[in-house]
Amino acid sequence: MHLDILETTIEIDESFVAEPPRAIRAQIGAYERGERRTFDLTVDLPDGAVGRTMAAMAEIPYGETRTYGDLAADLGTVPVAVGQACARNPVPLIVPCHRVVGSDGSLRGYSAADGVATKRRLLDLEARVRGSDSESDPEAVQTRLPTDR
């Protein structure tokens, strides 16, 4: 499924999401307008290291970032493995791989069209929306996983 957001296209593999494409598009549209910080979508995570990394990415709060190294340390792996899992994320944005950055805060890559420029636009959107809301919820989880049902 091709999703147009912030002047670019993000490819989502809807076979990993339980809800219909219309629900996915509606929630992505609300996210882009700054009306939604979390997605009420159930994602079927892949097995293995990619799935474990995706679960960790899903826990990164809206408007915040974590480094590849931080996630790697939490998962008992190496930063390059986290980067590879980010690149294989079948549902970017829904599982927010755009919130994973280099140890120096640099943007290392993004799988959507326009790559790092898209990652920057997503992070800027979240920073603007979060900054405009003094009641931000640091405990918000980006994506509901199947085990949360």
Image: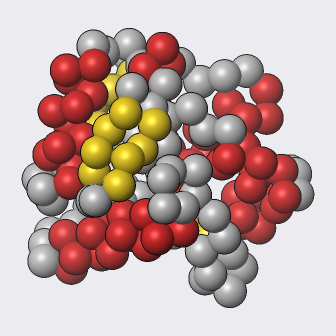
Q: Nearer the viewer, residue 124 or 71?
A: 124
Tell me if residue 99 comes above or below residue 13 in the rendering.
below
**View extreme (bottom): residue:** 104
Q: Quadrant of the N terminus?
A: top left
In percent of width and height, residue 14 lies at 43, 20
Instruction: State the residue at coordinates (83%, 50%).
Output: 81
Q: Is residue 29 above or below residue 41?
A: below
Measuring from the top left, give residue 34's x and y in whole percent.
Answer: 15, 59
Above or below 113: residue 39: above
Q: Quadrant of residue 94?
A: top left
At 37% across and 33% down in the image, what residue appears? Answer: 2
Q: How many marks?
A: 0
Residue 3 position (above or below residue 129)? above
Q: Is residue 136 left or right of residue 62?
A: left
Q: Is residue 64 visible?
A: no
Q: Where on the picture, by quarter, is residue 80?
A: bottom right
What residue sits 59% from the left and 24% below the top? 45
Q: Is residue 76 left or right of residue 117?
A: right
Q: Position of residue 118 (x, y in %)?
A: 43, 63
Whether residue 121 can be seen here: yes
- The figure's colour scheme reads secondary structure
| Quadrant occupied by the C terminus | top left
Q: Is residue 66 left or right of residue 145?
A: right
Pick the front one: 113 or 105: 113
- The location of residue 4, given as percent across then percent down, is 28, 45
